[in-house]
Amino acid sequence: MNTLIRLTRDDDVPALPAIERSSGEAFRVVPDLAWIADDDVQSIDAHLDFVRAGLSWVAVDADDRPLGFLCAEVADGALHIWQLAVLHDRQGHGIGRSLVDASIAEVRARALGAVTLTTFRDLAWNERFYRKVGFTTLAVDEVDARLAAILAKEATYGLPAARRCAMRLTLAGGQAAPALTRT
């Protein structure tokens, strides 16, 4: 399957909440997290803010229809991934990995030092996925104030703090390892 990764355009934004909702279906198999599948998704306005900042990418099919997206922000010399979502029926085909690759390319272009994110520690499509891409899970004493604040805020939304972690992909000399490929 050929998937193109490109910057998100304003006209893509209306499709993104449905992609996030579909992506969340994966949580239905985890009884204590199944509620996430029905939780609120990111607003259109929030998506537009990421688009205007040039920090939102979509994976599109041959007809230019969005299949997934990644949105991020730059903070403290790092690109922080806020959301990665792929249509539920398209997960497991390398789309998420290609979107992460696009974010790493942006980190290189901006000469930033790292990519960061927060995620669930024990789910195959979360921590284990990011480890395969090259991220490391930060120990409690490695979590900086920014990431600690994000984790604390997530807990106020009902995400179980004991199951969450912060991760980082540190770039050396402007290059991330391993290099990723697009599908």
Image (cartoon, rainbow, N blue to C red):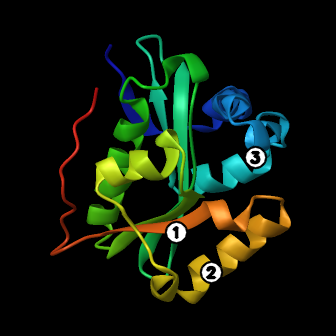
Q: Return the residue nearer the eye: 4 or 34.
A: 34
Q: Earlier in the sequence, mark 1 or mark 3?
A: 3
Q: Is residue 168 visible?
A: yes
Judged left or right of residue 110, residue 23 is right
| Vertical position of residue 126 compared to residue 11: above or below | below
Drawn side of residue 131 relative to residue 34, left or right: left
Q: Are marks 2 and 1 in contact (CB under 8 Å)?
A: yes
In front: 113, or 24? 24
Distance from disc 2 to disc 1, alpha carbons, whole Å, reads 8 Å
Snapshot quadrant of residue 37: top right
Instruction: Name the residue tied to disc 3.
Output: 42
Q: Residue 8: percent from the left, percent from the top?
A: 53, 39
The residue at which mark 2 appears reads as: 148
Q: Quadrant of residue 150?
A: bottom right
In primary-sequence order, the first of circles 2 and 1 is: 2
Q: Is residue 60 above or below residue 129?
A: above
Label 3 Cα neighbours within 10 Å, binned few <14 / some 14-19 / many ≥20: some
- At mark 2, the secondary structure is helix
Between marks 3 and 2 in the image, the one whose residue lies nearer the viewer: 2
Task: Identify which amino acid the numbered label 2 is placed on.
Answer: Ala
Picture residue at 84% right of the left edge, 41% below the top: 39
Q: Between disc 3 and disc 2, whose residue precedes?
A: 3
Q: Which residue is mark 1?
A: 166
Q: Where residue 176 sits in the image (x, y, percent)? A: 22, 62
**Helix, strand or loop at disc 3?**
loop
Image coords of residue 19 (percent x, y): 65, 29
Dot 1 crowding, Cα within 10 Å, few <14, some 14–19, many 20+? many
